[in-house]
Image: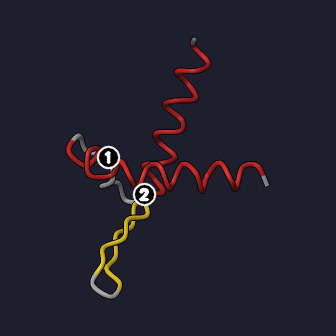
Amino acid sequence: MKWLIAVALALFIFSGLTPWLRRIGFGRLPGDFRFRLRGRDFDVPLASTVLLSLAVGLLARLL
């Protein structure tokens, strides 16, 4: 259950940072989904979230 909360929280934070991160290339990986529903754009950056989590995990392990 804790991992589900962590993933949901990471997706929420990542979706807020999407405009800034798109400028540096995140959010355009093959596992990232973008769709329009009732005139609003929604981003579901699954692959980018996994990649970012792995990078942060490796950085935390090194420190």
Which residue lies at the image location 34% right of the left edge and 76% below the top edge? 35
Relative to 24, 16 lies left or right: right
Report helix, strand or loop for mark 2. strand
Quarter of the view holding residue 23: top left
Q: Residue, x 27% and y 84% (percent of image)? A: 39
Considering only vertical position in the picture, is 54 above or below 15?
Answer: above
Question: Does residue 34 appear to the left or right of 1 in the view shown?
Answer: left
Residue labelled with disc 1: 26
Instruction: Report the number of numbered marks.
Output: 2
Tag 1 near tag 2, CB within 8 Å: yes
Which residue is drawn at the image coordinates 61% and 52% (left, top)? 7
Q: Alpha-carbon distance for marks 1 and 2?
A: 9 Å
**SS at mark 1?**
loop
Residue lying at the far left of the rendered structure: 23
Residue 45: percent from left, percent from top: 42, 57
Which percent across, then down, holds residue 15? 41, 55
Q: Three-letter amino acid code at disc 2?
A: Pro
**Nearer-the-camera pick, 9 or 47:** 9
Q: Position of residue 10 (x, y in %)?
A: 54, 48
Which residue corresponds to mark 2? Answer: 45
First in residue order: circle 1 vs circle 2 = 1
